[in-house]
Image (cartoon, grey):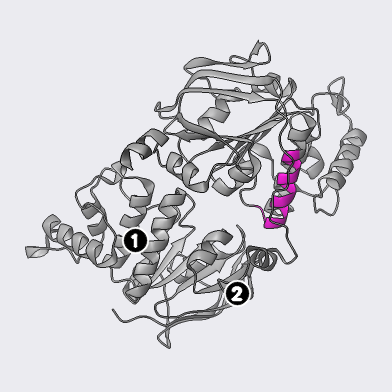
Amino acid sequence: MAGMDLKLRGITKRFGDLVANDRIDLTIRPGEIHALLGENGAGKSTLMNILYGLLQPDAGQLLVDGQPVELLSPANAIAAGIGMVHQHFMLVPVFTVAENIMLGDEWCSGPFGRLSKRQARRQVQALSERYGLDVDPDALVGDLPVGVQQRVEILKALARKAKVLILDEPTAVLTPQEIDDLIRVMRELKENGTSIVFITHKLREVRECADRITVIRRGQVVGSASPQSSEAELASLMVGREIDLEVAKAPADPRQVVLRVRDLVVRDDRDHLSVNGVSLDVRAGEILGIAGVQGNGQEELVEALLGLRDPQAGTVTFGAEELLGHSTRMILDSGVGYVPEDRHRDGVIGGFSIAENLILDRYHRTPFSRRSLLQPAEISANATRQIAEFDIRASDASATLGTLSGGNQQKVVIAREMSRPLEILIVSQPTRGVDVGARTFIHQRIIAERDRGAAVIIVSTELDEVLGLADRVAVLYRGQIIGAFGSGASRETAGLLMAGVTPAERSIAS
């Protein structure tokens, strides 16, 4: 298959006053893996959505093999030889692999224009063999692991003769072993002449697979780099200043058990069993990391601990007191801090000021309220202290929270929870959507809480983050703790557990 030379020239895209892409130039060469690196919100996905016809640029030009093209829809992009695998897969779970791949395409039509499943199966098998993508055409997509579902999406694009394949944050929901397999597949595709645009903010993966790296910051191309660049150099390009990526911490000094969870059973909003008999002990002065691929019960577990979701069975004791049945306010008031997974949905109110957001869970208590009346002077003084201590970059405390960057919004949540005495701190996805500099600061504050004597629970789908922060790690798989280990365990061990492979199963397989 002949490759495609693709050029983007002066691409600009605005959403109101926000300039998401600002005169971006980018060249994708035939048969290369080109990494588009940048923090969440840098403008990477917007640029690729323009390339795939999902968005139209306000200015600029796209050139395919030197000829200008207008991509007014994904159908235009597919016809031009551009395919895209989205971060959230576009598959029908109750259909087979072959049925998903034939949807919306005519290459598998049989006599009289009828869709031919037999033809679809043959095409899937041929593509699987050609590109080293081992997929069963008759398997139901809903029964496949996430990594194999991603292969189906790739096959779907290749079946439509994609010469340029866009992978948008493709490793976000994969285990380390699935990531290694994806990188192998990407190299196979490259060898067959396919160009790959790899969108990510993960430095390790970029260095492992990219031929060229383009870094985007705040909607602009700020530089290019080679895979030989260090992670520190790439991080500095991403945020515009020098960054220390190491998580520095002293050994833990675990003390008494503060939180004890026994045989917890929780159902999700669809009444599916999402937490199935989980038991945990969390000690003062230690960080317990909960690792796992997204969707294995982490959210429901945290919500049950905080009184946001009623469990079906089990006990949760804080010291000698049973927490189940208590309101969320009572649990927070008893010395539990909570940094939610989705700050926009559960952590902040964008239209409120920074000062108001810093007291969202304490506005009813002194000194912020007396005789049911808010105390503006105390609220303002508190905000001034927290802005300074937690390095929140803002003009002043009265600024609307929605005007802050993602990292500074997360710092507001961190400041609110950590500026009071805590016995337990529960942090879910602590650095999602923040830049590398804010990430380092947040990690330091979490470690400081541990060193002060709090029991800390970190829930994160970022394995490197869990391994860097946690003193002990428990892996959640399909609602159960499938294994636990100390801080010295390897990424391989953790990754196998995240994929559902226990040490005993691994030993038998060996």
Q: Is residue 92 left or right of residue 357?
A: left
Residue 454 location, x and y as percent?
74, 28
Q: Residue at x 19, y 67 (%)?
A: 107
- Quick one: label 2, few (<14), some, or many (20+) residues within 10 Å? some
- Quick one: label 1, few (<14), some, or many (20+) residues within 10 Å? many
Is 430 rendered above or below residue 164? above
Q: Which quarter of the figure is the C terminus placed in?
A: top left
Which of the two discs, 2 and 1, sits closer to the camera?
Answer: 2
From this viewpoint, which residue is outermost toward the left?
111
Q: Residue at x 82, y 23 (%)?
A: 365
Q: Residue at x 43, y 56 (%)?
A: 180
Give the quadrant of residue 230.
bottom right
Magenta run includes residue 446: yes
Is 357 rendered above or below residue 13? above
Res. 163 in view: no
Element at label 1:
helix
Report the residue marked by disc 1. Answer: 154
Magenta run includes residue 129: no
Mark found first going from the N terminus, 2 or 1: 1
Residue stretch rendered in magenta on the structure: 434-447
**Disc assigned to residue 225:** 2
